[in-house]
Image: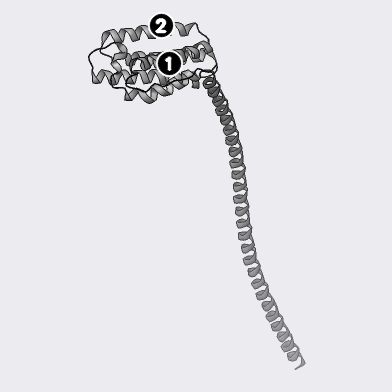
């Protein structure tokens, strides 16, 4: 009888222990699962944080690159502005040195289209509208080309001569279209004279010759068409 009680008691204890162990095992497994879930969430947050950090680093790097590019472009802009300022001073200096030549250029460019019979400048008696238009374009091209060489070329005489010769080549090609032989030949002769002059002249001499030619053309136009155009006095700066 006593032995049965002991066995029953022992069985109850074993059952209670099993239940307790099972309970704690279930709790442990639940906590373990929750811990795994939390660990998974933490890992995902960490991954997201690392991605955000990578994105921030990339943005920061891009900003640094943009800033570097900005300062490089700013530096280039400063250099360009300095060059423009130097070129502007160069232009002002030439205008100040050759006021009559510059004023003659502006007058001719402004008035040349309004002159009805420019062919008279080349001693052509019979008026030809096509030739008249062609000669006007040639004269305007000569004036613009001369101003371009004087104002916009680099500072060295060698580079100026090179560009001036290129402009003479352009005028030669334009002159080839003129269908009056005497006029065409006289233009070719003048171009060759200037070409020879350029090969041995300094930068200042070239600029001076450009404005001399423009002034001579202005005087010729004013003389031939004084009755058609109001007299315009251009005062030479002393």
**Residue under label 1:** 214
- Give the mark, 2 or 1, whose residue is nearer the N terminus: 2
Among the 4 quarters of the image, the one containing residue 73: top right
* Front residue (pair 227, 98): 227
**Residue under label 2:** 193
Instruction: Give the SS element for disc 2.
Output: helix
The answer to whether residue 148 is seen in the rendering is no
Foreground mark, 2 or 1, reads 1
In which quadrant is the C terminus drawn?
top right
The answer to whether residue 158 is seen in the rendering is yes
Colour scheme in use:
one colour
In which quadrant is the N terminus drawn?
bottom right
* Front residue (pair 125, 191): 125
Among the 4 quarters of the image, the one containing residue 155: top right
| 42 left or right, relative to 219 | right
Q: Residue furthest bottom?
A: 1
Q: Which mark is residue 181?
A: none
User: Residue 44, how many percent across, how many down?
Assistant: 60, 60
């Amino acid at each position: 009888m006593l032995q049965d009680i002991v066995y029953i008691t022992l069985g109850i204890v074993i059952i209670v222990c099993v239940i307790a162990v099972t309970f704690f095992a279930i709790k442990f497994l639940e906590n373990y699962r929750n811990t795994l879930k939390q660990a998974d969430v933490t890992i995902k947050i960490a991954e997201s944080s690392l991605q955000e950090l990578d994105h921030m680093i990339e943005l920061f790097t891009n900003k640094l690159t943009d800033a570097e590019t900005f300062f490089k472009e700013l530096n280039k802009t400063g250099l360009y502005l300095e060059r423009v300022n130097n070129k502007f001073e160069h232009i002002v200096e030439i205008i100040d040195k050759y006021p009559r030549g510059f004023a003659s250029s502006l007058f001719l460019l402004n008035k040349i289209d309004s002159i009805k019979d420019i062919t008279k400048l080349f001693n052509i008696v019979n008026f030809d509208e096509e030739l008249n238009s062609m000669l006007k374009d040639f004269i305007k091209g000569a004036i613009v080309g001369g101003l371009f060489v004087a104002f916009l070329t680099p500072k060295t005489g060698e580079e100026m001569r090179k560009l001036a010769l290129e402009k003479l080549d352009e005028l030669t090609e334009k002159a080839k279209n003129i269908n009056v032989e005497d006029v065409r030949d006289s233009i070719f002769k003048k171009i060759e004279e200037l070409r020879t002059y350029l090969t041995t002249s300094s930068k200042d001499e070239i600029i001076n010759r450009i404005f001399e030619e423009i002034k001579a053309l202005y005087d010729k136009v004013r003389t031939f068409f004084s009755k058609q155009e109001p007299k315009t006095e251009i005062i030479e700066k002393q």
